[in-house]
């Protein structure tokens, strides 16, 4: 899922997710795959992983 899709599912802005990722290298221990076009792809079950923590 894209950063925008993750942000929508979590009810927050995509920039907040990008900021935390750039500061810590992850978003609450979730690490995305960085594509050649510099986009981030998050695991499909990222929302479930965050809720279950």
Image (cartoon, grey):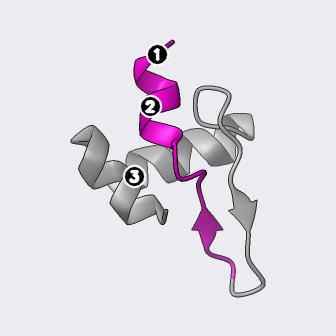
Classify mark 1: helix, strand or loop: loop
* Nearest to viewer (mark 1 / mark 3): 1
* Nearest to viewer (mark 2 / mark 3): 2
Identify the mark nearer the N-term, 2 or 3: 3
Q: Distance between the residues labelled 1 and 2?
A: 6 Å
Classify mark 2: helix, strand or loop: helix
Q: In this view, does 21 lie to the left or right of 51?
A: right
Q: Which mark, by number, is residue 6?
A: 3
Classify mark 2: residues with Cα within 10 Å, few (<14), some (14-19) or many (20+): few
Q: Mark 2 points at which residue?
A: 48
Mark 1 vs 2: CB contact within 8 A: yes
Q: Residue at x 34, y 50 (%)?
A: 7
24 inside magenta stretch: no
Identify the mark nearer the N-term, 1 or 3: 3
Mark 2 vs 3: CB contact within 8 A: no
Question: Residue 41 occupies which quadrant of the picture?
Answer: bottom right
Q: Distance between the residues labelled 1 and 3?
A: 15 Å
Q: In this view, does 13 lie to the left or right of 23?
A: left
Q: Which residue is drawn at 29% across and 39% down?
A: 10
* Residue 34 locus on image (x, y percent): 74, 67
Q: Camera-side residue: 22 or 40?
A: 40
* Residue 25 locus on image (x, y percent): 74, 41
Q: How far apart are marks 2 and 3 (CA)?
A: 11 Å
Classify mark 3: helix, strand or loop: helix
Q: Which mark, by number, is residue 52?
A: 1
* Residue 33 locus on image (x, y percent): 74, 61
Q: Residue at x 52, y 28 (%)?
A: 49
Q: What stretch is highlighted in magenta?
A: 38-53
Residue lying farthest to the top in this orientation: 53
Classify mark 3: residues with Cα within 10 Å, few (<14), some (14-19) or many (20+): many
């Amino acid at each position: 899922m894209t950063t925008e899709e993750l942000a929508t599912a979590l009810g927050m802005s995509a920039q907040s997710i990008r900021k935390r990722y750039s500061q810590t290298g992850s978003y609450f221990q979730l690490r995305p795959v960085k594509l050649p076009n510099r986009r981030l792809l998050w695991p499909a079950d990222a929302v479930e992983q965050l809720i279950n923590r």
